[in-house]
Amino acid sequence: MKSKRSSAVLGVVDDDESVRMALSSSLRSANWKVIAYSSGSHLLGDDRRSELKLVIADIHMPGMDGFALLDAINLAEQPVPVIFITAYATQELRERANAGGAVGFFSKPVDDARLLALIGEILQK
């Protein structure tokens, strides 16, 4: 039987390529499978999105922001947990993320150890 870690696929959505690649690399080094997206609309248009077990998304992106992506994911037939990351963390954004159903909220640069611990906790449920 495969462990959840080896079988779970995580989506990483960030318009900043360096952040997207660094976060994806960190997750892969912890043995997670990752699909990286440059925008929320790319994730929503991807046939592989049904494989995702969790999404980590930036809040501030051109076009579809993280909150619009969260809303779309929550309306899906099988919604998945969403963790937000942002370079502009404010109490208002944190409260809005919580109200929208986000399961985590991290300031950039992301504390990888805390993020990995939260992902492990969420996917063990």
Image (cartoon, rainbow, N blue to C red):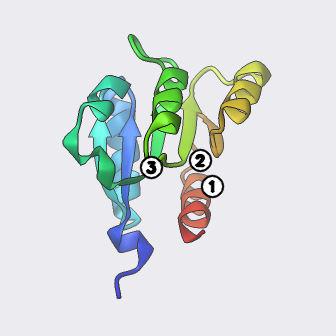
- Which residue is under mark 3? 78
- Residue at 28 percent of width and 47 percent of height: 35
Q: From the viewer's perspective, is residue 95 above or below residue 50? A: above
Q: Mark 1 falls on what kind of element?
A: helix
Quick check: can you spot residue 108?
A: no
- Which residue is under mark 2? 111
- Residue at 31 percent of width and 55 percent of height: 51
Q: Report how far apart the C-alphas of labels 1 and 3 lie in the structure.
A: 26 Å
Q: What crowding class fits label 2: few (fewer than 14 Cα within 10 Å), some (14-19), or many (20 or more)?
A: few
State which quadrant residue 12 falls in.
Answer: top left
Q: Amino acid at mark 3?
A: Gln
State which quadrant residue 124 falls in.
Answer: bottom right
- Which residue is under mark 1? 114
Q: Are marks 2 and 3 in contact (CB under 8 Å)?
A: no
Mark in the foreground, 1 or 3 = 3
Residue 27 point in image, percent of width and height: 40, 56
Q: Residue furthest top?
A: 63
Q: Mark 2 falls on what kind of element?
A: loop
Q: Which badge, 1 or 3, comes first in the chain's sequence?
A: 3
Q: Amino acid at mark 1?
A: Arg
Mark in the foreground, 2 or 3 = 3
**Nearer to me, 11 or 87:** 11
Q: Report how far apart the C-alphas of labels 2 and 3 lie in the structure.
A: 28 Å
- Residue at 42 percent of width and 71 percent of height: 5
Q: Are marks 1 and 2 in contact (CB under 8 Å)?
A: yes
Residue 10 point in image, percent of width and height: 38, 52
